[in-house]
Image (tube, helix red, strand yellow):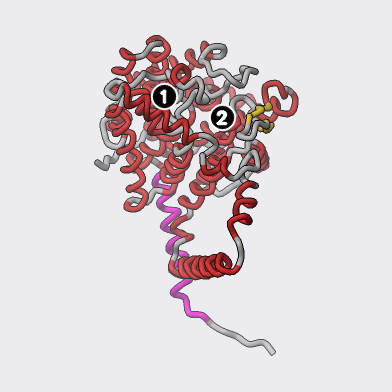
Amino acid sequence: MNLVFDSTRSNNIRPTSPRSLSEFVRRWMDVPVVTMAGYVSIFAIAFGNLIDLETDNDTVSIAGQAFVKVMFLAIAGIYGGVGLLTDARVRKVVLSFPMMWMVLLVGFYCISVLASPIKLESLASTMSIACVLLMTVTGLVQLGVRNVLQTVFAAMSMYILFSWFTFLLVPSIGVFYEPTVDGQTVARMGGLAHPNVLGQMSGLTLVMALLIYHLDPSLSRIKMLVLVVAAAALVFSMSRTSLLATIVAVSVFYRSHIFRRQYLIWVLTFGSILLLFVLAAAVVFDLESAIASRLGMFSKSGDPDELFSATGRTQIWAYALHLIGEQPLTGYGAATTKIYLADYSFHCHNLVLNIAFSTGVFGGLIALWMCLERTFRLFVYRHPIADALVVFILVNGIFENVIFSILAGLPTMIWTIGLCIPLLKDDEANRQMFDRDRQIEEDYLNRQSAPRTWSLQR
């Protein structure tokens, strides 16, 4: 179902930047309370909901910083609830597909609370999902796509800067010592949480910067600095999944340029030559040991077997499937993996498996269909911004829970943004994106059709 919604007039007007601090404060004082609540909740949840400053790396908990997180989730829930009750556009988005898959999943999460051994925590986790969902949709409709993207980018930038601060100055929090399969430990940059969380934040920051630059082709010195520290954080976090997700998301964003006819011919030609070379080398040389040694370079322990077991995730997936088979109808409830998977790193380490574990087989099937349906749309309906965000989450979702974590945060917001943006066709950022794409395509066709002249210089 493709719906077209009229954006508010404020979404179509790009305000000028404040020239002084007093002007900035004066503008904020003139902002309505509801609008300010939207900006504050989006920034706070994107920045803070994945923070875990516990120095004990072997525990997972929603205690400690939970009070502050729940407070901002309450603000987000009120903001999203008001939007749902008072704005027909928000209701249309929420009740349209693909957003209805998210609504159905929230319903299954609510039912699974009854089967949870920790009902209060499962209910809090479920409510966090609903609050983030409503807040994100309301923000996109009422604040505009561009403003939401810029607010999220600012929050992620702040997260990365603080992560570097803890990594360099408070190593008891910022450095994560991870055991490897051969009994050794590897020091990874964790910053404010687990290194995989930092990897997701860093990769998303790079992708988001690219999307914002596509809408507004200008790079300030501050943005350049953020890009440098985000790229460095992505490397030092040693999150291979986030690095792969970043590369794939950028490739999907530029796929209309990469797979043009003349480039596609070169790619296929190069790929065919490379394949023939590999086959010939396999006949002449013993490549097995050479490949094994090269693959070891991409593992944390140096053992290539670590890659084929997805750093132990295959064992986790097998055990999670076994537990789902024992309670397939209701699942175990949200936030219960820390109990049932205490001996398996506390997580299912897969997006669909995590939802199926929490809600049962039917919730898992809805999650699987939602992912497949959105993947199919990549090939039939091109939307560069939404596609890049969705692909980043999908690639990460192969090896991580990503969305619907213990307390929903940035990844759930990003996934919701990726599902919603194509529905808001009248949004100023959407129109500008398609206008820019159309202009790039016209310039390319003009260059292709222009007569070519050749000159020889003596």
The residue identified by callout 2 is 155
Mark 1 Cα-neighbour bin, 10 Å: few <14, some 14–19, many ≥20: many
Q: Outermost residue toward the left?
A: 1
Q: Is mark 1 on a helix, strand or loop?
A: helix
Q: What element carries label 2?
A: helix
Compared with residue 456, is residue 259 higher up or lower down, i.e. above or below? above
- Inter-mark Cα distance, 1 to 2: 15 Å
Give the magenta range: 429-452
Residue visible at 43% across and 55% down?
A: 437
Identified by mark 2, the residue type is Ala
Identified by mark 1, the residue type is Val
The residue identified by callout 1 is 132
Is residue 144 in view from this perspective? Answer: no
In terms of image quadrants, where is residue 21?
A: top right
Q: Does the magenta stretch include residue 432?
A: yes
Compared with residue 14, is residue 105 higher up or lower down, i.e. above or below? above
Residue 37 placement, left or right of 422:
right
- Residue 336, image x, y percentages: 42, 18
Q: Relative to the observer, which residue lies in front, 423 or 391?
A: 391
Compared with residue 221, is residue 125 higher up or lower down, i.e. above or below? above
Compared with residue 183, is residue 298 higher up or lower down, i.e. above or below? below
Q: Outermost residue toward the bottom?
A: 458
- Residue 7, image x, y percentages: 35, 36
